[in-house]
Amino acid sequence: MSTKPLDYENLNENVKKCQYAVRGELYLRASELQKEGKKIIFTNVGNPHALGQKPLTFPRQVIALCQAPFLLDDPNVGLLFPADAIAKAKHYLSLNSGGLGAYSDSRGIPGVRIEVADFIERRDGYPSDPEHIFLTDGASKGIMQILHTIIRVPTDGVLVPVPQYPLYSATISLYGGSLVPYYLEETADWGLDINDLRQSIGQARQNGTTVRAMVIINPGNPTGQCLTEQNLRQIIQFCYEENLVLLADEVYQQNIYQDKHPFMSARKVLFDMGQPISKELQLVSFHTVSKGYWGECGQRGGYFEMTNIPPKSVEEIYKVASISLSPNVPAQIFMGLLANPLKLGDISYEQFSRESKGILESLRRRAHIMTDGFNSCKNVVWAMYSFPQIQLPPRAIDAAKKVEKAADVFYCLKLLEATGISTVPGSGFGQKEGVFHLRTTILPAEEDMPSIMSSFKKFNDEFMDRYE
């Protein structure tokens, strides 16, 4: 019998080459163990509500009313919902004819895009054009759409930081492009050396790659650092000189757990630098409701904003967005609520402020518990937040080779089997040859963090004693 189109051997080779470590081997094994009855702590992916983070009350009240607008006609609605939630729900329902069950414009609801533009202007101090803002099903969909637009042929390359979030390596592979790595310097708080960047692009060009774009992840994922203003200026100047579009993944801008470097958007730094560069460098910036104290991963709300992109190119991007007809409409409202938050004096402001500050303060405490815990472990170094370096003994590396596993995968599998802690090996994010890491999140409940870190330390130190 002849093979069929969807038999494995006949699949698109780019699909088969695509790898996504966050939901890879470790996650699949953790899911198997969970089915067998083992308690699993899923720290492999940033999924706050799945690990116990409570949703913010006000946004959920607004969405509830938008999803069930008949409640607004009930004379007792004011007994269940605050007046400002009722007013917000009526506001958003008025923006999209047919409410949440109707398609919106393919770029997103115009009124919400105006709210996002106002948010960007308040953040950066420079006006934003809502016509250059596209609302998307999470930031990931926007990133994929822009990469699809940039990559034309296999020799088109994209500079991506190492370590990186595997969305980039997977998407570049899926669309048949070339990933060009540039390494962040671990001993300098994961900063960027512009000379290494020049070396990366020079080597790629010697190999026949046409480098067309550069990705920055700021704040870093998985590394957690904020790029300094000086680094951002260097990156912008570099992209300008090398004729690259800069893709700024800024989805963690609310997740800052250190005081050394505040978050600055690439867009603000670009405009601060003035002309001609502020009028010529092409920049696409991304944000989401999935991170920070919102943590609304399942809602899939996000946006991208384009700076200095020609009108005809914007039209082509709009055309491709139109294939999907409309981004998720409830998620657009979440994005509007993030962009146009409650203000002092609003009825629900104090509760919203108390909830959001409580989540952020707890996340900061958890970050420090995890950092201190990792730094107390044998052979764990440079532990900043959730991407510690693990110095594996030669015997452990040899043991991994015998079972045909990468050394960090071997370590993380042993950790999972012993403790139920599901992590991601550093090789899934990229790392220098001979250096090993693991990636975890800081999202388990704060009261569980000490026992989790104690369990990790016990496993790690016993593992090191066994293999040294």
Image (cartoon, rainbow, N blue to C red):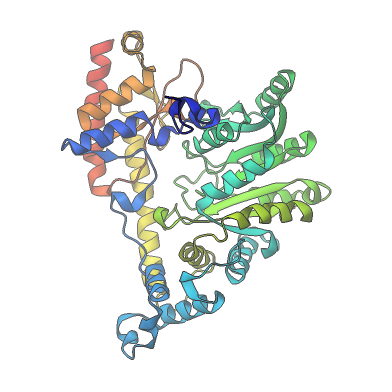
Residue at image position (51%, 62%) is 335
**Is the residue 334 above or below the residue 232 in the image?**
below
**Residue 187 makes an appearance in the image:** yes
**Residue 190 makes an appearance in the image:** no
Residue 160, given in percent of the width and then of the height, sits at 60, 33
Residue 388, given in percent of the width and then of the height, sits at 40, 29
Residue 26, located in which quarter of the rendered image? top left
The single residue placed furthest to the left in the displayed view is 37
Q: Nearer the viewer, residue 263 or 314?
A: 314
Q: Nearer the viewer, residue 132 or 105?
A: 105
Number of dots carrying numbers: 0
Q: Is residue 306 left or right of residue 401?
A: right
Residue at image position (36%, 10%) is 401
Residue at image position (70%, 37%) is 234
Q: Quadrant of the C terminus?
A: top left
Residue 216, given in percent of the width and then of the height, sits at 60, 39
Residue 399, located in which quarter of the rendered image? top left
Q: Quadrant of the N terminus?
A: top left
The single residue placed furthest to the right in the displayed view is 276
Q: Nearer the viewer, residue 343 or 319?
A: 319
Residue 455, given in percent of the width and then of the height, sits at 22, 32
Q: Is residue 422 left or right of residue 59?
A: left
**Is the residue 54 above or below the residue 410 in the image?**
below
**Is the residue 244 above or below the residue 268 in the image?**
above
